[in-house]
Image: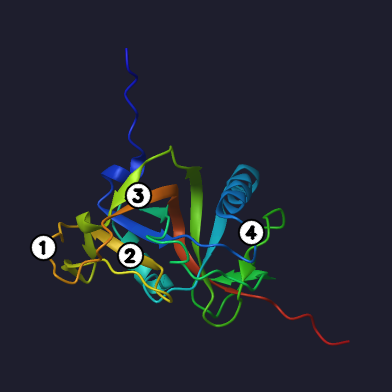
Amino acid sequence: MSVKRVQPEWTSASRLVVSVMGPHAGEESSVIFRRKIQDIATVGQTFWLVRSLGATPDAVRRLCSGADSVYVVFVEPSTSGGAQPTRTAVAASEYSIDRTNWVRLPRRLGPVTGKIDRGAYALCLDDLRESEPDVLLDLWAYGSPAAPHEALRTRIGRSTVCAIRHNTEHDPTRMRSRYRLVKAYGRLRQPFSCWLRRRRSPRK
């Protein structure tokens, strides 16, 4: 008798953040996932660095407003090298929801690394799981929250985007690669997204 696979939670969600994965400062995605999963086991949350115009903190919070649960789905690029690797591994030390009031990251949290400047922000997660093999995300089943009839489009500099469930298969501007292999998925938690910075040590 065959065992029916249980569908992951994100498949029934009407709103998603879709993130195309690439290497991070020489660290493979599977290693990063395990480290972030351990963060959640240790301190109940983790922070996933994002540098994408398609998923700014304000855009992510608008997406999450009024929703029961919003998930981020990490997918493979359509081709090898389709996601630009991150080469900088500076660790953030503080986060903020408004860029005015800053709070230190939890002491036992693993490093949150990347290019930490005014354009650095993070998704806030309280659950993260590596995907079962061969699970696919249909990009044509989602559109842009601002204009649902417009298909999702990712590119370098915009590798993470907000998405709302809407059939966009007839949009002529849709991406040619319809299905993407899912590597992992996580659940967003308050405040959903935040700014990051590295606090400079005071001069002696």
Res 162 label: 2
The N terminus: image quadrant: top left
Q: Identify which residue, 103 or 171, lies in the foreground.
A: 171
The colour scheme is rainbow
Res 141 label: none
The local crowd at label 2, few if under 14, some if 14 to 19, many if 20 or more residues have their Cα within 10 Å, is: many
Q: Earlier in the sequence, mark 3 or mark 1?
A: 3
Residue depicted at 22% across the width and 63% down the height: 143
Q: Identify which residue, 47 or 134, lies in the foreground.
A: 134
Real-space Cα distance between discs 2 and 3?
14 Å
* Residue with the mark numbered 1: 170
Q: Amino acid at mark 2?
A: Cys
The C terminus: image quadrant: bottom right
* Residue with the mark numbered 4: 27
Residue at disc 1, secondary structure: loop
Q: Earlier in the sequence, mark 3 or mark 4?
A: 4
Residue at disc 3, secondary structure: loop
Q: Amino acid at mark 4?
A: Glu
In-image side of 1 versus 116 (left or right)? left
Residue depicted at 60% across the width and 53% down the height: 32
Q: Identify which residue, 124 or 28, lies in the foreground.
A: 28
